Image (cartoon, rainbow, N blue to C red):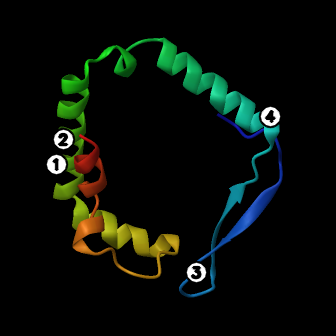
Amino acid sequence: MAPHSADVNTVINATTEEAMGRMPVGDSADVDAAVAVARRAFDGGGWSDLDPLERADALERFADEMQKRSALIAENGMPNGLSFRPTDSREPGSCAATQA
């Protein structure tokens, strides 16, 4: 979905303070569009139609896949401005696993 505004912000790496990219600035029209898309997706069935055990199974599978890729995810998180490496309790997948 293209942003409503043509405005952009420069993204700064919190660790190096170097510019690492640019991203569009969202406005209220962008928020309204995102909420409308989310509402259609929710009302369209799928996730909201699953019973709690089916949702838990899906979240556990997602958490397992995130855990398999944790080194790659951590490596790619550093360029996004993350100034520290997550501890074991915050590894990718652990949050999803606790929600299942």
Q: Residue at x 25, y 67 (%)?
A: 89
Element carrying mark 1: helix
Q: Which mark is residue 64?
A: 1
The span from disc 4 to disc 3 (Cα, nearest Å) is 29 Å
Where does residue 71 sit, x and y in percent of width and height? 23, 68
The correct choice, above or below, for 69 with respect to 34 in the image is: below
- Residue corresponding to mark 4: 29
Q: Secondary structure at mark 4?
A: helix
Measured Cα–Cα span from mark 3 to mark 1: 29 Å
Foreground residue, 15 or 97?
97
Q: Amino acid at mark 3?
A: Ala
Sooner in the amino-acid sequence: mark 2 or mark 4 = 4
> Which residue has dot 3 on it?
14
**For the residues bearing labels 2 and 1, Cβ distance under 8 angstroms:** yes
Q: Amino acid at mark 2?
A: Glu
The CA span between labels 3 and 2 is 32 Å
User: Mark 2: few, some, or many residues within 10 Å (few <14, many ≥20)?
Assistant: some
Q: Earlier in the sequence, mark 3 or mark 2?
A: 3
Residue 29 position, x and y percent, is: 80, 34
